[in-house]
Image (cartoon, helix red, strand yellow):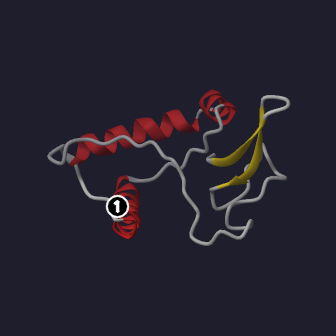
Amino acid sequence: MVGVYRHRTSGGQLDALAISSLRRDEALPNIPTTLEAGYPNSEYTFWIGVLAPAATPKDIVQRLHEEIARALSELAMRQRLKALGADPMPLTPAEFEAFLKAETESNAVVIKAAGIAPN
């Protein structure tokens, strides 16, 4: 869950203003998404993935995928991730490759529009 927050100085707490995911978070059902709050193209999801060198044999990649998917299917793991605010999105190696390609293209548009140059 990625959020937009405002600091409340009187109590030293944070007020959640919006969630940048495509759907509301179960833990904060009354907090709108940034899209619902009127900010088009504001969806952004932080993600963590496992990458291997390009030359890694496909059978090794498949085995890694199966073991990670098995771990993510265990109740204790799901509960722990949920407690941390994480929402697993298990993808096949092909789905993850397509996801990475789309993320790269999307971020390239933002980088170009912002005029960011490599150092």
Nearest the eye: 13 or 83: 13
Could you say where residue 12 lies in the image, as x and y percent from the top left? Answer: 78, 29
Q: Is residue 109 above or below residue 95?
A: below
At horizontal 48% and vertical 41% (from top left) the residue drawn is 69
At horizontal 56% and vertical 70% (from top left) the residue drawn is 41
Could you say where residue 106 lies in the image, as x and y percent from the top left? Answer: 41, 66
Nearest the eye: 105 or 83: 105
User: Does residue 37 appear left or right of residue 102 in this picture?
Assistant: right
Which residue sits furthest left?
Answer: 55
Nearest the eye: 23 or 67: 23
Which residue sits furthest front?
Answer: 9
**How many numbered circles are shown?**
1
User: Does residue 88 appear left or right of residue 56 in this picture?
Assistant: right
- Kind of residue sitting beneath label 1: Thr
At horizontal 64% and vertical 28% (from top left) the residue drawn is 80
User: Does residue 65 appear left or right of residue 29 in this picture?
Assistant: left
SS at mark 1 in the image: helix
The image quadrant of residue 13 is: top right
Q: Which residue is mark 1?
A: 104
Q: Is residue 98 above or below residue 92?
A: below
Q: Is residue 22 above or below residue 49?
A: below
At horizontal 26% and vertical 58% (from top left) the residue drawn is 117
Could you say where residue 84 lies in the image, as x and y percent from the top left? Answer: 64, 32
The image quadrant of residue 85 is: top right
Nearest the eye: 112 or 103: 112
User: Does residue 34 appear left or right of residue 47 in this picture?
Assistant: right
Could you say where residue 44 lies in the image, as x and y percent from the top left? Answer: 54, 57
Circle 1 packing at 10 Å, graded few (<14), some (14-19), many (20+), is few
